[in-house]
Amino acid sequence: MRYLNKTSNPAFSNYFWKAQPRATKKMTVTGILIKTLYCLLIISSIVLASWKLHTNGTSIKWFTSGGMLAAVVISIVLSVRQQWAHILVPLYAVAKGFFLGGITVYAQTQFPDLPYQAIGVTLITFFVVLFLYQTKLIAVTNRVKSTIITVCSSIFVTYVISYILSFFGIQSFIWGTSWLAIGFNVFAALFAALSLLLDFDYIERQKNKAPKYKEWLATWGLLVTIVWLYVEILRLMKKYAIRF
């Protein structure tokens, strides 16, 4: 039972969902949906603006690293100031917009229309996983949860180590276009998709129970997973495009 309330997504950990003072308004699925769509609109607008700047000759070299760093800082602040979620989560969306703007513009420049295909695959994957969850075709058991948590944690550690090694001029196998690199990408994309199951399950458990402001925390959690899934799919499609 120790995995009952765990998820691979840090935004859905018990730290954010432990007992809180009673509140009149409670978290609802509709509220989460509206806030998630709002944040995705922010991200999409910034990605489009990034492309416009790029086509006008403006350098967006630092968009990716700057957006990623800002997203990390905002996430840390959010972890200790949950009541600021209604401000921090939209700011997180802005940061992710710059991050995705950088990598999306680069992909579009090198492989026209590839980002659109990646967005399409991401949306299809999201709704397929949601369907599987709603119809209970995949049961989110404790064993399933523990497996996804362990694998996603391992993937995260692998990325961190590879990123650190890059500062010393050492390129990890995961960044290449070898079959091993592609296999790792497929593996990471698969578990990014599966982690949505845990997010859906946790929201299901907390709806109509958690305070209203935690809809923003739930939104943040979904954004973390959706962005990760899109990035993995885009990287995978780029590798296939380069190799074939």
Image (cartoon, grey):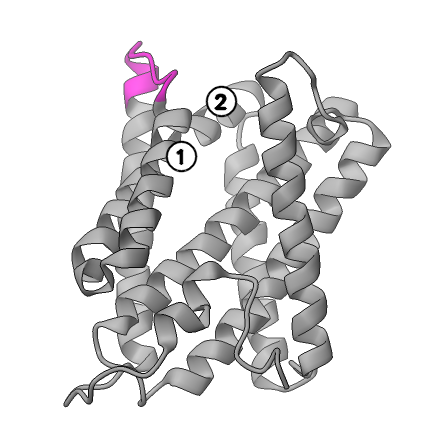
Residue 138 visible to an observer of this rendering: no
Location of residue 180 (image quadrant): top right
Q: Secondary structure at mark 1?
A: helix
Location of residue 47 (image quadrant): top left
Looking at the rendered structure, the kind of residue marked 1 is Met
Image position, residue 225 (x, y; %): 50, 56
Q: How many marks?
A: 2
Query: Quick one: 79 or 241, which is closer to the camera?
Result: 79
Residue 13 visible to an observer of this rendering: yes
Q: Which residues are magenta?
A: 53-62
Q: Which mark is residue 68?
A: 1
Residue farthest toward the right in the current orientation of the protein = 179
User: Which is nearer the N-term, disc 2 or disc 1?
Assistant: 1
Image position, residue 241 (x, y; %): 70, 28
Q: Which mark is residue 212?
A: none
Residue 55 lies within the magenta run: yes
Residue at the spot 17% in from the left edge and 87% down from the top edge: 23
Image position, residue 133 (x, y; %): 59, 79
User: In the displayed structure, does residue 206 sit left or right of residue 186?
Assistant: left
Magenta span: predominant SS is loop
The N terminus: image quadrant: bottom right
Query: Quick one: 194 or 107, which is closer to the camera?
Result: 194
Residue at the spot 39% in from the left edge and 16% down from the top edge: 61
